[in-house]
Image (spheres, grey):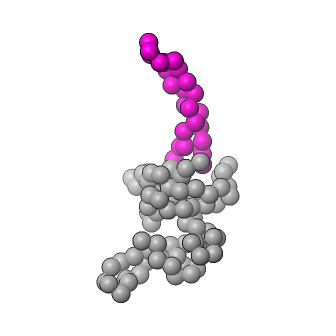
């Protein structure tokens, strides 16, 4: 998986298609990501003696194949590639504008 926490992504399929947000968590073993403001579900919290119960909205994980990273220059979704920069470090780049992401 080429996605990291903090990347700005756009959902390309599913019920939230077209929405954009930043990745707040990655689940590499499951190939899923949690995107802020996408795939929102209501979670019921049981109250205890001191606090009342409540209903919270929580962002749930979606499959990493359903999101694409947004190119910083054009603002369009693009694929990710890899290259070695001048310092000899392997970095992620966008396929459209060849912009470094790391």
Q: Residue furthest bottom?
A: 86
Q: Residue furthest front?
A: 50
Q: Is residue 4 above or below residue 34?
A: below
| Towards the viewer: 9 or 12 | 9
Q: Check if residue 53 falls in the magenta segment.
A: yes
| Towards the viewer: 28 or 39 | 39
Q: Residue furthest left?
A: 88
Q: Is residue 66 visible?
A: no
Q: Position of residue 100 (x, y in %)?
A: 46, 77
Q: Position of residue 15 (x, y in %)?
A: 67, 49
Rendered-image quadrant of the C terminus: bottom left
- Give me the residue at 56% from left, 81% from top: 97
- Give me the residue at 37% from left, 83% from top: 84
Q: Is residue 86 above or below residue 100?
A: below
Q: Position of residue 6 (x, y in %)?
A: 47, 59
- Give me the residue at 43% from left, 77% from top: 82
Q: Is residue 5 visible?
A: yes
Q: Is residue 44 above or below residue 38?
A: above
- Give me the residue at 58% from left, 36% from top: 57
Rendered-image quadrant of the N terminus: bottom left
Q: Position of residue 61 (x, y in %)?
A: 51, 47
Asked where in the image residue 86 lies, by quadrant, the reply is: bottom left
The stretch of residues the image draws in magenta is 38-63
Q: Specify whether 73 is left or right of 4.
A: right
Q: Check if residue 71 falls in the magenta segment.
A: no
Q: How many numbered callouts?
A: 0
């Amino acid at each position: 998986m080429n996605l990291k926490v903090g990347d700005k992504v756009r959902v390309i399929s599913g019920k939230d298609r077209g929405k954009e947000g930043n990745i707040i968590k990655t689940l590499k073993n499951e190939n899923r990501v949690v995107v802020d403001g996408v795939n929102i579900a209501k979670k019921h919290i049981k109250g205890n003696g001191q606090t009342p119960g409540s209903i919270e909205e929580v962002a749930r994980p979606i499959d990493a194949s359903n999101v694409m990273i947004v190119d910083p220059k054009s603002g369009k979704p693009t694929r990710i590639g890899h290259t070695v920069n001048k310092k000899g470090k392997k970095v992620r780049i966008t396929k459209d504008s060849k912009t470094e992401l790391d």
